[in-house]
Amino acid sequence: MDINPIDIIIHIINIVVLFVLLRLLVYKPVSKFIKERADSVNSHLENAAQKEAEASKLLEQYNAQIMSAENDAKSKVLEITTNANREADEIIGSANNMALEIIEKANQKAQAEYDSKMNDLSDDIADVAVNMAKQILQREVTVEDNQKIIDDFFNSRKN
Amino acid sequence: MVDENMLKLAGDFTEQDIERIRSGFSKMLGREIRFKVVRDDSLIGGFSAFINGKVYDASVLARIEDMQRQFTD
């Protein structure tokens, strides 16, 4: 088998040409493509990272808002409970006062009624006593009694 | 001037008693007093004299009523 140097040169030239062509036609676009692709991926990654950062920031904000809302809710509940307790105490207090007033009035009424009955009773007793006295004296008054009444009357006027 | 007045009596009185009442009032009031004597047993005892619209009550009834008033006040 004999090798012809010209053939070799031609092959080399072919290879070089092919290499140049490939480099021009294939390597550059492919590497450009690859670079663009990489850039795109990087930008997507960056974008994703940014989005993740934003998301976590938002998450923090939301958590903070939720915590603040919870705190507000707790303080609101506490405030409402405190007000309710205070109002309940006021209602109970006024109810107690009303009860005491009612009891006081009832006592006064009972005392007034008792006093009135006692007065009536003493009046009745007085009437009975007077009537008895009248009836007894009606029979008992003598001439001497009347003479003493005359003496007493004029003696009391002399002083 | 002699006043015509009324003297109510309850129970037994003698004429001397009535005269004593009349002279007592004449002396007390400083003028001659004459009475129209009336018996009123509702007075229970003693007498009640009405002189010039004024009442001099020395009756047992008056005393009992005083007692009753004190009892109920």
Image: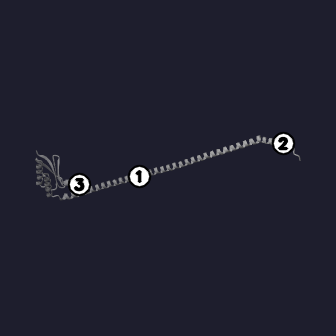
C-alpha separation, residue under disc 3 versus residue under disc 2? 167 Å
Q: Amino acid at mark 3?
A: Gln
Using the image, name the chain to which the residue with label 1 belongs. A
Residue at 84%, 42% in the rendered image: A9
What residue is disc 3 on? Answer: B70
C-alpha separation, residue under disc 2 versus residue under disc 1? 119 Å
Q: Relative to the observer, which residue lies in front, B50 or B37?
A: B50
Q: Amino acid at mark 1?
A: Gly
Q: Are marks 1 and 3 on the same chain?
A: no
Q: Relative to the observer, which residue lies in front, B16 or A36?
A: A36
Using the image, name the chain to which the residue with label 2 belongs. A
Q: Using a 10 Å C-alpha cutoff, classify the residue at mark 1 as few (fewer than 14 neighbours), some (14 to 19) or many (20 or more).
A: few
What residue is disc 2 on? Answer: A9
Secondary structure of residue under mark 1: helix
Is there any visible trace of residue B42 in the rendered image?
no
Using the image, name the chain to which the residue with label 3 belongs. B
- Image side of residue A132 versus residue A50, left or right: left
Nearer the N terminus, badge 2 or badge 1? 2
What residue is disc 1 on? Answer: A93
Q: Position of residue A62 (x, y in %)?
A: 57, 47
Q: Position of residue A44 (x, y in %)?
A: 66, 44
Q: Position of residue B73 (x, y in %)?
A: 25, 53
